[in-house]
């Protein structure tokens, strides 16, 4: 079964700005929603660096163009704590911290999309470029997931060309958030599965 969250967690381990589980620190989380009441939002403010959160709530509908398919929306958040405020009175200086943090989240989104485009290309039968400037761990990650039959099918369904993202208002002590939404088209179960009934 295709699980984008498993693929994302492995990517977060290899991606230097996140370095998930390096030195025992987590930077990848599975959450319900980004809201002030969630356990994640109440407790993540003690983190020092960037992190990534995958929303586990299900958002799906029957595809309008093809009723034999379902459209799922995956929501991924990138969070970066902006630098602490200064005593500067210059408005331009004060605005640079949040601005830089927002652009860093945008860079992270684009880095993830570049990896997903590469993996989808391999899943569609293209070879991993031999001159791809990545180390052996990243190369193994790219080919491992793209060659797994369940992930290959799942990667093919990602509508990366229609991905959209944007920053959200800062939360809790200046954490800047960028939300990324990716649609995935999957075949719809059209027959009753007798194994699921008494």
Image: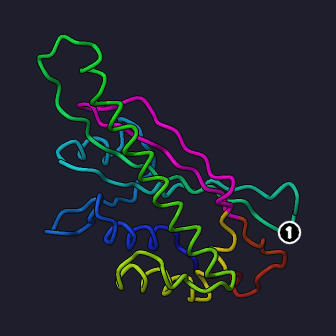
Task: Say left or right for 92 vs 195.
Answer: left
Which residues make up the magenta segment? 159-184
Task: Say left or right for 147 vs 70.
Answer: left
Q: Is residue 194 above or below residue 40?
A: below
Question: Which residue is depicted at the point 28% across and 59% down?
Answer: 27
**Coloring scheme used:** rainbow
Task: Say left or right for 57 vs 183.
Answer: left
The residue wearing badge 1 is 68
Q: Quadrant of the C terminus?
A: bottom right
Dividing the picture into quadrants, the one containing residue 80 is top left
Residue sticking out furthest to the top: 89
Q: Quadrant of the N terminus?
A: bottom right
Q: Nearer the viewer, residue 12 or 6?
A: 12
Q: Is residue 136 above or below residue 107?
A: below
Magenta stretch contains residue 162: yes
Dividing the picture into quadrants, the one containing residue 14 is bottom left
**Helix, strand or loop for disc 1:** loop
Magenta stretch contains residue 176: yes
Dividing the picture into quadrants, the one containing residue 153 is bottom right
Q: Nearer the viewer, residue 36 or 172?
A: 172
Q: Main secondary structure of the magenta part?
A: strand
| Mark 1 crowd level (few <14, some 14–19, many ≥20, 10 Å Cα) | few
Query: Residue 155: image x %, image y %?
Result: 62, 73
Query: Residue 54: image x %, image y %?
Result: 44, 57
Question: Which residue is depicted at the point 79% across and 58% down?
Answer: 62
Query: Residue 137: image x %, image y %?
Result: 35, 83
Number of numbered discs: 1
Query: Residue 187: image x %, image y %?
Result: 77, 73
Question: Which residue is depicted at the point 41% across and 29% down?
Answer: 169
């Amino acid at each position: 079964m295709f699980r984008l969250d498993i693929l994302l967690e492995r990517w977060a381990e290899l991606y230097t700005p996140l370095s998930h589980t390096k030195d025992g620190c987590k930077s990848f989380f599975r959450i319900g929603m980004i809201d002030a009441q969630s356990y994640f939002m109440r407790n993540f403010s003690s983190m020092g660096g960037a992190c990534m959160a995958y929303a586990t709530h299900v958002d799906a509908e029957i595809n309008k163009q093809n009723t034999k398919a379902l459209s799922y929306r995956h929501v991924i958040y990138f969070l970066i704590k902006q630098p602490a405020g200064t005593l500067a009175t210059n408005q331009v200086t004060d605005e640079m911290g949040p601005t830089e943090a927002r652009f860093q989240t945008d860079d992270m989104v684009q880095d993830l999309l570049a990896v997903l485009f590469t993996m989808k290309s391999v899943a569609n039968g293209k070879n991993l470029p031999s001159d791809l400037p990545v180390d052996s761990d990243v190369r193994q990650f790219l080919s491992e997931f793209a060659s797994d039959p369940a992930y290959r099918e799942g990667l093919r369904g990602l509508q990366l060309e229609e991905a959209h993202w944007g920053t959200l208002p800062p939360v809790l002590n200046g954490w800047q958030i960028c939300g990324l939404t990716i649609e995935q088209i999957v075949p719809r179960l059209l027959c009753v599965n007798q194994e699921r009934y008494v």
